[in-house]
Every structure is written in C-alpha cells, then in structure tokens.
C-alpha cells in the first residue's frame, strides 16, 4: 500500500505502474446517500491515473492500518482545514493492486475543491 500512497501523493504514470497491475479496477463508492453504491469505476492504469490526477494538490495521505486485504487511511488538506479517512479493500496480484474498493468515511459537507 506504500506504493499506492505514493501514487496518490504524486499521480504519475511511473507511480501508478509501481502500485497497480495493468488491468487494475478501482471502485469509488458514494460518500453521501447510498454509501454502498459504486459512484465510479476505473479500469486500467490510464483511467486510474486520470482519477488520481483529479484530486487537488496538497493532500497529505497516510496509512492508519493494513491487514493485507483491508487498509484504513487518513487524508488531510491543511490549506482547507479538512480531514477525513476511509477504508480500502483490495486484492494484490504479484505484489500490485489488482482491485481496490475505495470507501471514504461519511462527511457532512463537500470537501474543498
């Protein structure tokens, strides 16, 4: 998951390739109503890279815990006084992420843009 954190912090083709299998699938779940519903699906490194590049600069990502298939993360946007966390459920193949389910913790307001 350290390579995934690096890709989140520096979303480049190289970082995504270090973290993700070529055919990775990332499922991003909703953060407000219907939280168990998939909001977006990204297939392949190119789509995952585009997804990661949408995030605003300055986010500080950290890993809270990781048991090899489920990880808790924390994110902070110091410039906007915003913090949140969430859970990643994931499958590895040959040490690379093959599938990742991205569940942000519930928030009461939209995160800063």
Image (spheres, rainbow, N blue to C red):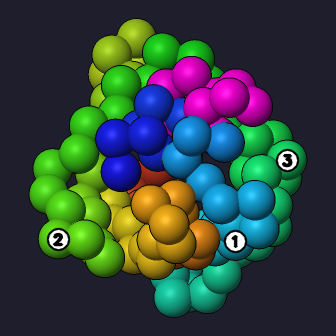
User: Residue sitting at 33 percent across and 16 percent down?
Assistant: 78
Element under disc 3: helix
Instruction: First in sequence, mark 1 or 3: give its number.
Output: 1
Residue 112 located left or right of residue 43:
left
User: Residue sitting at 50 percent across and 66 percent down?
Assistant: 94
**Residue 15 forms part of the magenta stretch:** yes
User: Residue 97 has which mark?
Assistant: none
Instruction: First in sequence, mark 2 or 3: give its number.
Output: 3
Distance CA(mark 1)–CA(mark 3): 11 Å
**Residue 36 forms part of the magenta stretch:** no
* x, y percent for residue 57: 57, 17
Element under disc 1: strand
Distance CA(mark 2)–CA(mark 1): 20 Å
Is 94 placed above or below 12 here? below
- The residue wearing badge 2 is 67
Is 78 placed above or below 85 here? above
Element under disc 2: loop
Instruction: Name the dominant secondary structure of the magenta segment.
Output: helix
User: Residue sitting at 31 percent across and 76 percent down?
Assistant: 69
Q: Quadrant of residue 113?
A: top right
Q: Which residues are magenta?
A: 8-16
User: Residue 25 has which mark?
Assistant: 1
- The residue wearing badge 3 is 46
Residue 11 located left or right of residue 23:
left
* x, y percent for residue 100: 53, 70
User: Residue sitting at 70 percent across and 71 percent down?
Assistant: 25
Residue situated in front as seen by the camera: 24 or 40: 24
């Amino acid at each position: 998951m350290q390579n995934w954190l690096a890709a989140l912090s520096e979303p480049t083709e190289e970082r995504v390739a270090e973290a993700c299998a070529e055919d990775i699938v990332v499922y991003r779940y909703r953060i407000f109503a219907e939280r168990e519903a998939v909001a977006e699906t990204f297939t392949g490194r190119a789509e995952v890279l585009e997804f990661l590049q949408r995030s605003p600069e300055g986010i500080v990502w950290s890993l809270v815990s990781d048991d090899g298939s489920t990880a808790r993360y924390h994110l902070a946007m110091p410039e906007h006084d915003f913090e949140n966390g969430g859970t990643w459920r994931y499958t590895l193949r040959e040490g690379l992420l093959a599938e990742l389910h991205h569940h942000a913790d519930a928030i009461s307001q939209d995160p800063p843009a």
